Image: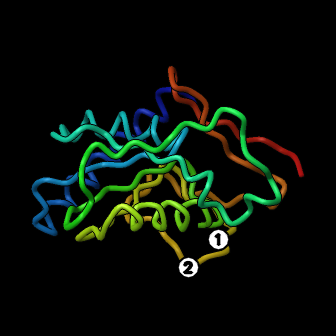
């Protein structure tokens, strides 16, 4: 998917998010992006939605349930939440929702910071292959892929989606 395709998906997500916020009477949400691709998507949505608070960024490396199998990436950036999460309405953003394990790890980390009033999950792409009962509230595009196919967001400028074949 080209840069223009991704921009269209982001515009749709911003519109859907705004509607959901209005429907739920949420006027002052905060936004958190999951490193790395989720932060890129969140930066675009944060700007389009004109959210007042600075963007939060989560690095869920230490919260992953496969940490012992995959090891630690040598350039782990710390999480940055420039706001309290207690009783806040959070928009959690990721690039690709696949198994649900990244979102589970992100929620665990958020709850270590406090107890939010609510969490709205936004994903640029929701693909088949869920292992945990997690679904996005806001989705740019749903796609069915085989076990050997993967979709990857590249960026940050321009943001494009690439379909990859592999094991």
Q: Where on the picture, by quarter, is residue 129? A: bottom right
Q: Write the residue at 37% across / 49% down.
A: 32
* Dot 1: element: loop
Residue 101, label in figure: none
The colouring scheme, among rainbow, by chain, secondary structure or one colour, is rainbow
Q: Is residue 44 above or below residue 101?
A: above
Count of picture labels: 2
With 110 as the anchor, is 149 left or right in this view?
right
With 18 as the anchor, is 107 left or right in this view?
right
Task: Identify the residue at the far bottom of this view.
Answer: 133
Q: Write the residue at 51% across / 25% down.
A: 156
Please report contact status of discs 2 and 1: CB closer than 8 Å, yes or no. yes
The 10 Å Cα crowd at callout 2, few under 14, some 14 to 19, many 20 or more, is few
Q: Write the residue at 67% across / 36% down.
A: 162
Q: For this rendering, which residue is in front, 87 or 162? A: 87
Which quadrant of the rendered structure holds the N terminus?
A: top right
Q: CA distance from mark 2 to mark 1?
A: 7 Å
* Dot 2: element: loop
Q: For this rendering, which residue is in front, 21 or 35? A: 35
Q: Position of residue 12 (x, y in %)?
A: 34, 46
Q: Position of residue 66 (x, y in %)?
A: 74, 62
Q: Position of residue 62 (x, y in %)?
A: 61, 55
The 10 Å Cα crowd at callout 1, few under 14, some 14 to 19, many 20 or more, is some
Q: Is residue 132 above or below residue 74?
A: below
Q: Is residue 159 above or below residue 58?
A: above
Residue 133, label in figure: 2
Q: Which residue is mark 1?
A: 130
With 89 as the anchor, is 93 left or right in this view?
right
Q: Write the residue at 68% across / 66% down.
A: 65
Task: Identify the residue at the far top of this view.
Answer: 157
Q: Position of residue 91 (x, y in %)?
A: 32, 56
């Amino acid at each position: 998917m080209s840069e223009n395709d991704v921009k269209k998906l982001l515009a749709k997500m911003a519109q859907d998010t705004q509607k959901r916020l209005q429907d739920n009477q949420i006027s002052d949400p905060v936004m958190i992006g999951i490193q790395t691709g989720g932060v890129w998507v969140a930066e675009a949505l944060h700007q389009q939605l004109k959210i007042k608070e600075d963007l939060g960024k989560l690095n869920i490396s230490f919260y992953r349930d496969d940490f012992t199998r995959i090891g630690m990436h040598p350039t782990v950036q710390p999480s940055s939440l420039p706001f309290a999460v207690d009783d806040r309405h959070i928009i959690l953003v990721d690039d690709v929702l696949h198994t649900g394990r990244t979102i589970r790890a992100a929620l665990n980390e958020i709850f270590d910071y406090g107890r939010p009033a609510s969490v709205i999950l936004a994903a640029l792409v929701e693909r088949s292959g869920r292992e945990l009962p997690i679904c996005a509230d806001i989705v740019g595009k749903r796609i069915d892929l085989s076990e050997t196919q993967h979709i990857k967001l590249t960026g940050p400028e321009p943001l494009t989606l690439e379909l990859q074949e592999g094991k």
